[in-house]
Amino acid sequence: MVPMNSPDRVMLDTNIFDKLLADPGAINVLNDLTKRSLVVILTTHVQADELAAIPDVNAARRVSLEAVYRQLDMTEIPTSGAIWGVSRFDRSMWGDGSGSLRIGDIMRSNPKDAEDALIAITAAASADIFVTAETKELPNRIKAKGTALEVLSFEEFMARMRALSKGP
């Protein structure tokens, strides 16, 4: 008997929901792969919180992005660390990270990087793939720590997922 490969565990950065909004077919591909147990999409409270915090001046965009978030078949996990004022302590693990990446590796001294730090450290601890629209600082900080986490752009990720959905 041939052992089944475990599904790719994927963490989406909050900025990826804009990309999913622009490519609604991607949601169907991802949900199909999830149903077929080929992919597990992980999320934390942070992504939902960031979407909910979009200002009322952009209420239509917020509503659309929250709808995309709810359409995806995702598994919520606690963040692998906690930051005062950002973390929901009932949905976070205490500390500065439980994997190969720590909050300070991402956040450094900029409090505006808190959400990125929580998502990235959780991805490093629990996911195989981290998908982000950021192209420089965040991916470079992750790669600099030598984690096993693969960082992909939305386009790279969806090309892989579309190929996976078609099979060998």
Image: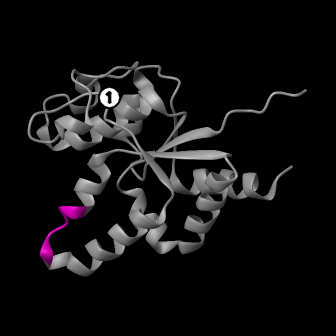
* The magenta stretch spans residue 92: no
Residue 62 appears in which quarter of the rendering?
Answer: bottom left
**Range of the magenta residues?**
52-56
Q: Is residue 80 above or below residue 60?
A: above
Main secondary structure type of the part rendered in magenta:
loop
Give the residue at the far bottom of this rendering: 60
The residue shown at (60%, 51%) is: 156
Of helix, strand and loop, which one carries label 1? loop
Read off the residue under disc 1.
Answer: 80
Residue 49 appears in which quarter of the rendering?
Answer: bottom left
Horizontal and vertical percent for residue 79? 31, 34
Horizontal side of residue 135 vs 2, given as left or right: left
Horizontal side of residue 79 vs 111, given as left or right: right
The residue shown at (35%, 76%) is: 64
Looking at the rendered structure, the kind of residue marked 1 is Ser
Quadrant of the image for the N terminus? top right
Mark 1 packing: few (<14 Cα in 10 Å), some, or many (20+)? many
Q: Is residue 52 above or below residue 22?
A: above
Q: Is residue 48 above or below residue 120?
A: below
Horizontal side of residue 53 vs 97, given as left or right: left
Give the residue at the far left of this rendering: 85
Horizontal side of residue 49 vs 98, given as left or right: left
The residue shown at (36%, 22%) is: 101
Q: How is the image coloured?
A: one colour
Front residue of 1/27: it is 1
The residue shown at (21%, 37%) is: 90
* The magenta stretch spans residue 55: yes
Front residue of 29/57: it is 29
